[in-house]
Image (tube, helix red, strand yellow):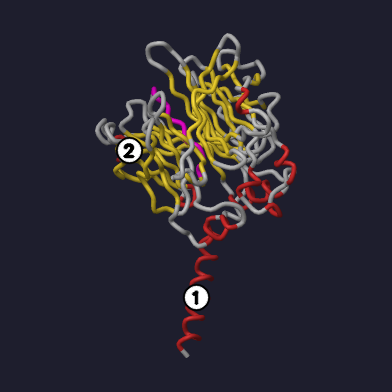
Amino acid sequence: MILKAFGVLLLLLAVHRVWKMSLKLEIYKKGYINRPGPCRNVLPIETGSEDIALASNGIAFISSGLNICRFTCKSSCDPRYCQYEGRIYKFDFNKPNDDVVTVKLPEELVDENFHPHGMDLWQDPDSGEIRLFVVNHRKTEESVEILKYNDESNSFSLVRSVRHKLFNSLNDVAAVGPDSFYAANDAYIGGCWRIVESFLGMPWCTIVYYDGETAKIVEKGRPYFNSVAVSKDGSSVFLTVPSDQQVNIYKRDNKDGSLKFYRSIEVGCRIDNVFIDDTTGDVWFGGHPSAHLLSQHVADADMKAPSQVIRVHPKGPADDPFSSYQLFSPFEDDGELVSASSSVALYKNKMLIGTVLHKAAFCEIN
């Protein structure tokens, strides 16, 4: 009798979990079209533009060629994605009509050893030196590649490759110095088992802080972390939690890198990568209106997934800016222009939108 009652309880819990997950999948949600101004695709990107890192002079670096098949069951992933080649593109906001160009990678990262994901940029305030921090899914391990950019040769040199046992399933990185960063693990296990981890809502995701020598976990206890970003003054850290459709804000200790939870902002969309506008303080996200259509897009490259850009405008006082805020949706697409938007970058009333596996778009903001 006890076993029967226990079985019924497990069944009820499973049904409740399935019901909750079905709500989060937004199965019946459709894509709409909304433009801030004229928009066009950025050529020749065809194999994704997952994340964008912007330098102060308007030069944007774009990661492309994410091997998403390693994050899910092969049966639920279009095999064409497995053929994507890892690249870093460069886009110049000062010459918006030009195509992107491929930046030459260091020799250590060729021969199919480069599969980029999230990125961030650190710029020396005195010399102007640019370092790009890139999450790289190597064949056998996770790493964060720190690359130095040479403008004259349009190439990267490898400063160092950071690998650590705390890097389980890296998604994004946020630089806080020439060698230090935060890294977000979006899961604990890989492959098909990720689905089980997600279904059960296991709180195994972590945020790792690397100070240039050692690494430690500074946040955990959620079922899915995604993107991480640091405010310009280094006092706040923003962390997207797509499954909860929210961004968490933390106060950061500049001495030891520890984080203290501050508040959450509900955005009503499964947000992906985060971009902070240092001029206005606005926080922008690439987002996925329908997780269901996103999964179909992953399973079949010919299927389109809607895209959305979310802008959070703080209205609170200087000491607590996000105590009050407004939400805007300046860009939406049904998947034809860009499918499954994952990132956004702003520069002088111009916007660049990236996608997980599809094209990129450039828009004028009127």
Residue at image location 38% in from the left, 32% down from the top: 213
State left or right for residue 122 relative to residue 92: left
| Residue 308 percent coordinates (x, y) | 56, 39
Q: Is residue 275 magenta?
A: yes
Residue at image location 43% in from the left, 46% down from the top: 246
Q: Which residues are magenta?
A: 271-279
Magenta stretch, main secondary structure class: strand
What's the residue type where badge 1 is placed? Leu
Mark 1: few/some/many CA within 10 Å (<14, 14-19, 20+) = few
| Residue 257 percent coordinates (x, y) | 32, 36
Q: Nearer the viewer, residue 258 or 113?
A: 113
Q: Is 31 rendered above or below residue 134?
A: below
Q: Nearer the viewer, residue 265 or 185?
A: 185
Q: Quadrant of residue 66?
A: top right
Which residue has dot 1 on it?
Answer: 10
Q: Is residue 55 visible?
A: yes
State left or right for residue 44 relative to residue 92: right
What's the residue type where badge 2 is placed? Phe
Q: Is residue 346 visible?
A: no
Secondary structure under tag 1 reads: helix
| Residue 10 percent coordinates (x, y) | 50, 75
Label located before the other in sequence (2 or 1): 1
Secondary structure under tag 2 reads: helix
State left or right for residue 112 relative to residue 94: right
On residue 168, the disc is: none
Q: Which numbered disc, 2 or 1, marks the residue closer to the eye?
A: 1
- Give the spatial CA distance, label 2 vs label 1: 40 Å
Furthest residue toward bottom: 1
Residue at image location 49% in from the left, 52% down from the top: 188
Residue at image location 53% in from the left, 23% down from the top: 158
Which residue has dot 2 on it?
Answer: 322
Mark 2: few/some/many CA within 10 Å (<14, 14-19, 20+) = many
